[in-house]
Amino acid sequence: MTSGKTSIRWPAFAVRIAHSMIRDWLVWAVLLGVFAVIGVALHEEQREFEGALETLARQQRMLALVLSDELSARLSAVHRDALLVAADVSEGRGPSEGMRNAYPRIEVLTESQAAASRTEPRMLTVRSASTEGRTIELTVPVAWLVSPSSRIESPDDLVVLVKPAGDSSWQTVDGRQVAGEALTRSVASGDDTVLLERDEAVNLGLPARRAVVAIATADVASFGSWATAVVASASHERDRWDRARSRIFLGVLVPCALIIAFGWAALRRQRRELALEKQLAVADLVRESDTRLARASRAATTGTLAMGIAHEISTPLGIIIGRAEQLEARVGSDPKAARAVRAIAEQAAEISQVVRGFLDLARGNFPALLPIEPANVIRSAVRLVEHRFLAAQVKLEVRLDEPLPALAGVNLLLEHAIINLLLNACEASSPDTTVDVWVRAENSNVDFIVEDRGVGIGHENITRATEPFFTTKPEGSGLGLAIANEIVNIHRGTLVIEPREGGGSRVRIRLPACEDKDAVQ
């Protein structure tokens, strides 16, 4: 029975996570940098916070020493006043009016009364014996001894405590008693500063923040060791630290979050653009493949049609050649007629060779490439089209660079390709214009260049000019440049069509030079 829950394949899931992390390494690097910056900033702020606590502790230590000295002075004054009252009693006078105003309670006790007397909590009793055997007791509140500290106390910031000698509790300026175990332990261990935790600070009436305590002790004769503690809350320092930490997070995380967000959006957009570019590239490839298939199909159709036409032409050509041979025997006495008949026979024979060449190409039988002279090819082609240029009143200028390397090719096919270029140039030229033909050596190649000054060819038609049946002429067949391009490809060359500066067209056939030059006769 199959469970409805989908189980997770953890190894595959981990691999996907690892691949995602590797793919998005830049994002992880940015996050690592952000955390590093935050960590360094927090570390520096923590050091400043600790330095502020040390400064606060030094300030409270100085204050505790001042208050301890003042407490010692007050204790000494109380002891001195007790001796003065005892002297007055010994002389038969009672406590002076000033003493009674200064101390809440002054008592003259007998020996038995003094033995039974007990010191009340939170009170300090000073005893002094008179000469008559009586005991003088001056009783003052402990809070009175530290009452000057009330000027510096603040309920939310600072508290002053005092611990009388022999007492286990601490007293505040307002007379409250607090346990203060941590303070007592510090006095016992001799520490002059201690750091209180939040709960201990709350017990002393301070905010729920850590507090700094400075302790000073004073040893006064006949009173023992009294301890004075100044407890200051670190709330201001802690609040400043919290604000600094918030500024750090806001100052680093917000810009980084914006950067990451914009970067992520840009990355997603770039990925979409790359995906679209890939789709366009695939579409272009498919379209190009379809174009090639269509071109190959048209070429196959054209080849089949050419084979049929060539086969049909071969029979009339044979008849023309035979009749020309018969006429040549009959007009032997007329030189002009004999030359005309021989020209007919020669041209018919040449047409027959071209037809056989095309039949071989259509069957896939490529002809053997033999060394030929470029100059002979261009001269033969020019001789065959001269009458067309004369009839069109177009001047034909030929320039041959010397020396020219030999070519490896078929003379008749190259002549036919150049004838097609010359005829196209003648048809595109106006009367009284010039068509330039230039044959030159270019590195290890030979260039055949034909330039006319006609209307030219548009950039949008250059790439299609060599396609079969493509033509811009009303009565053109669209096969001349296609045949010429195919012949050039057979000879391992290139055919380039481009606009001519100043108007017209420029067609260049570039063929590799023959390596075996010695084979040319």
Image (cartoon, grey):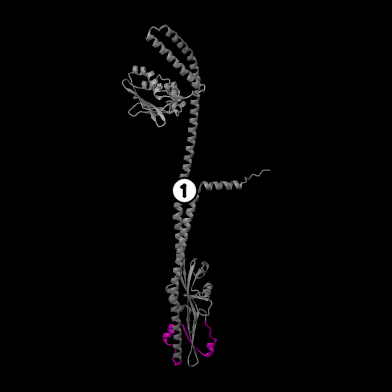
Residue 101 located within the stretch drawn in magenta: yes
Outermost left residue: 432
Q: Is residue 353 visible?
A: yes
Choose between 337 and 316: the one closer to the eye: 337
Outermost right residue: 1
Choose between 375 and 210: the one closer to the eye: 375
Q: Position of residue 158 (x, y in %)?
A: 45, 70
Choose between 48 and 370: the one closer to the eye: 370
Neighbor class of circle 1 (other Cα within 10 Å; few <14, some 14-19, many 20+) is few
Q: Amino acid at mark 1?
A: Ala
Q: Position of residue 289 (x, y in %)?
A: 50, 30
Q: Is residue 170 above or below residue 497?
A: below
Q: Splitting the image into 4 quarters, where does residue 243 fall?
A: bottom left
Q: Splitting the image into 4 quarters, where does residue 145 fall?
A: bottom left
Magenta part of the chain: 90-119
Q: Residue at x 49, y 49 (%)?
A: 27
Q: SS of the residue at dot 1?
A: helix
The residue identified by callout 1 is 261
Residue 314 located within the stretch drawn in magenta: no
Q: Residue at x 43, y 81 (%)?
A: 73
Q: Is residue 239 above or below residue 359?
A: below
Q: Position of residue 126 (x, y in %)?
A: 48, 84
Q: Residue at x 45, y 61 (%)?
A: 44
Q: Is residue 467 visible?
A: no
Q: Position of residue 1 (x, y in %)?
A: 68, 43
Choose between 343 and 184: the one closer to the eye: 343
